[in-house]
Image: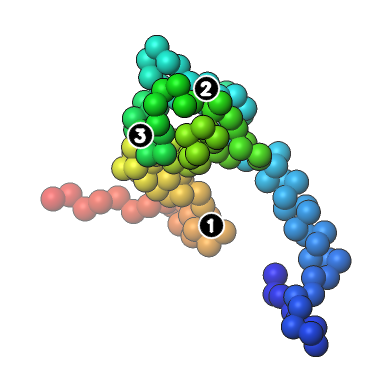
Amino acid sequence: MKATTNTRGRIVTTATEMRRAVTYARRRERTATKILATRYDGERDEIVADLSTGATLIVPRRAVPGFAKASPKDLVDLAITPGGEGLWSETADDGVLLEQILVLAAGEATLGTIGARINAAKKSPARAAASRANGSKGGRPRKAAA
C-alpha cells in the first residue's frame, strides 16, 4: 500500500486500503500459530507453552534470556501477551516471543533447514510450467553412463 499525505502532512488512508488491511488481519488471525496456554513447571524448571496447532513447546527457563536471571518464583505470574504471540512475566519484567521459543526448542540451524525445505517444495507458476513442458518432452533426460 502506498501512503499518501494531505496538505497538512498527515497520512491519508483510503477506505479501500482499510478494507484490505482488515481482511488481511482477519485472515492472519484465523491462520497464525498462537500460544493458547502456558505455565511454569517449577519441578523441572521449564517453560511450557501449548500452541493453537496442538503442539506443546517446552524450554528450560535458563535458556530464555529474559527469564534466565529471574528466580523461579518470579514466574508465577507468567501470562500470554495479547494476540497470543508471546509470554510475559510482570514480576520478572521481561518476556519472550513465540519465534524465540521455537528457536530455543528446535535450534536455529534446524529451523533454517526446515524453512529451506518448505520453500523448496513450493512451486512457482514458472517452475510448474517448466515441469509441464519437460514432462511433455518425455521428462528429465537420463544421466549419461560414466
Residue contact between numbered discs 3 and 2, judged by CB atoms under 8 Å = no
- Residue 124: give x, y in percent of width and height: 53, 57
Q: Which residue is identified by label 2?
A: 76
Left/right of residue 5 with respect to residue 102 in the rendered view: right
Q: Secondary structure at mark 1?
A: loop
For marks 3 and 1, give the CA distance.
Answer: 46 Å
Along the line of sight, which residue is nearer the eye, 2 or 46? 46
Q: Which mark is residue 66?
A: none
Left/right of residue 47 with respect to residue 5 in the rendered view: left
The three-letter amino acid code for the residue at tag 1 is: Ser
Residue contact between numbered discs 3 and 1, judged by CB atoms under 8 Å = no
- Residue 101: give x, y in percent of width and height: 44, 36
- Residue 15: give x, y in percent of width and height: 86, 66
Quadrant in which the N terminus is drawn: bottom right
For marks 1 and 2, give the CA distance.
Answer: 48 Å
Picture layout, residue 65 above or below residue 47? below
Residue 31 appears in the rendering: no
Along the line of sight, which residue is nearer the eye, 23 or 145? 23
Q: Which residue is identified by label 3?
A: 69
Q: Secondary structure at mark 3?
A: loop
Left/right of residue 132 with respect to residue 145 in the rendered view: right
For marks 3 and 2, give the CA distance.
Answer: 15 Å
Along the line of sight, which residue is nearer the eye, 140 or 122? 122
Along the line of sight, which residue is nearer the eye, 64 or 139? 64
Q: Residue at x 56, y 26 (%)?
A: 77
Q: Which mark is residue 124?
A: 1
Direction bottom: furthest residue: 7
Of labels 3 and 2, earlier in sequence is 3
Residue 61 appears in the rendering: yes
Picture layout, residue 92 above or below residue 23? above
